[in-house]
Image (cartoon, grey):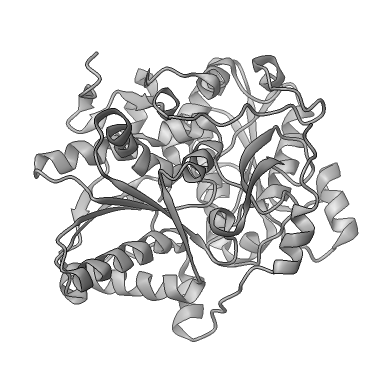
Amino acid sequence: MEETKILLAEKDMPRFWYNIQADMPNLPPPPLHPQTKKPLEAKDLQAIFPPDLIEQEMSRERWIEIPEEVLEIYKLWRPSPLFRARRLEKVLDTPAKIYYKYEGVSPAGSHKPNTSIPQAYYNKKAGIKRLATETGAGQWGTALSLACRFFGLECTVYMVKVSYQQKPYRRILMATYGAEVVPSPSDRTEAGRKVLAENPDSPGSLGIAISEAVEDAVGREDTNYALGSVLNHVILHQTVIGLEAKEQLARVDEYPDVVIGCCGGGSNFAGIAFPFLYDRFREGRKVRAVAVEPAACPTLTKGVFAYDYGDTAMLTPINMMYTLGHDFVPPGIHAGGLRYHGDSPLVSQLYHDGFIEARAYGQNQCFEAAVLFARTEGILPAPESSHAIKGAIDEALRCREEERSEVILFCLSGNGYLDLQAYDDYLNGKLEDIEYSPELLKCSLEKLPRIE
């Protein structure tokens, strides 16, 4: 297979995922076992992941073929459309060209099925009957609920409690697909009971919900765990976004100067950006990649680069990543999918090495950008995606000030039609700009694991 061109399944849809580990100048330090603190081995993951996903997690192979069964389901919405935001450009009076890759056309309404479908497929292939997972705002839980339905698996979703309360329609959609949805922290697990004993009114966090889902999966032989972001195999599956965007832009003889994505755990940012970083590493292309996160949970911009657990109960492997501390509980902002204390080790290493940039915005800034986008382009963005829009608008305004005609590409990772309460709060002046607590951050960082 020629490395300069991805073979396509249909029109612009790739037949292979791109593994950036083959091209990174520096790979992240190895993940560590949560108990022994020794480098993690494949056998250590067998209790929660099927063999194919473990192999992908540790692979250094550049191109990994997408199974035909996965491609057939991808065809329900892939290739996703690439649009030029001409009306937004006009309102901003910018010489820049703004393109966006719209992942909200998937059946679940976001980019998350790009990985939920292969994860369900590989678990079904391994004989697993049930998957347990967590979800923040509900996009991942919705995507996995749908994927499990497609492959005949049971699904239990631990949904962060503040989002469970804020976003009832996402919960209803998951139940419609057949999933059991549990508000987290719950009394169903030891991890949940411990949190509730210390704080009965805990709003929950992704770290807590991950602990509950992992505990659930480890406790049943017929159950595995599925994660919607952060891990290498999840990042791998999401590269269909950027690979398609490259082909689509090439059809109109365009190439981005800057690629932007919102960033919580890092999956959609990596999905849009990593295939372009391939060009930077392999061909020397001067493309910038910008990760945008909430000011209430500023993992890259305010966190530390250190070994930390991926969950609150310290059940998951210890990864080298940018982190706010595994028991940091972010404020209950509407962009629930970005309320994660850590980041993908791959994204973190690239940020540490200076290959990507990061910036953080408050809620009201992002919703202002989202409303402007809705009123010009007609699509209502998810609160998470509004961060990428705000980043793109700032780049376009910079181009206006500098009189530069650059090409801006961002990932519109999901639609916001089940997030109308958030928009109602914004439009009625009820949306607060909640900053993270430096005091809580300091306390959380003091609890990082000690690695010899």
Q: Which residue lies furthest to the right in this view?
A: 197
Instruction: Using the image as rendered, state which of residue 178 and residue 142 is in the foreground.
Output: 142
Say which residue appears at 20% left-offset and 28% top-offset: 10
Q: Which quarter of the figure has residue 305?
A: top right
Instruction: Using the image as rendered, state which of residue 283 and residue 49 is in the foreground.
Output: 283
Which percent across, then down, holds residue 442?
A: 75, 61
In the depicted structure, whether residue 8 falls above or below residue 137: above
Q: Quadrant of the N terminus?
A: top left
Which percent across, then down, holds residue 123?
A: 56, 22
Q: Which quarter of the figure has residue 154?
A: top right
- Judged left or right of residue 20, residue 80 is left
Which percent across, then down, holds residue 77?
A: 30, 40
Say which residue appears at 82% left-offset and 29% top-offset: 35
Q: Which quarter of the figure has residue 93?
A: bottom left
Which percent across, then down, holds residue 94?
A: 17, 70
Residue 416 visible, this angle: no
Q: In which quarter of the image is the C terminus?
A: top right
In the depicted structure, whether residue 381 falls above or below residue 45: below
Say which residue appears at 51% left-offset and 79% top-offset: 425
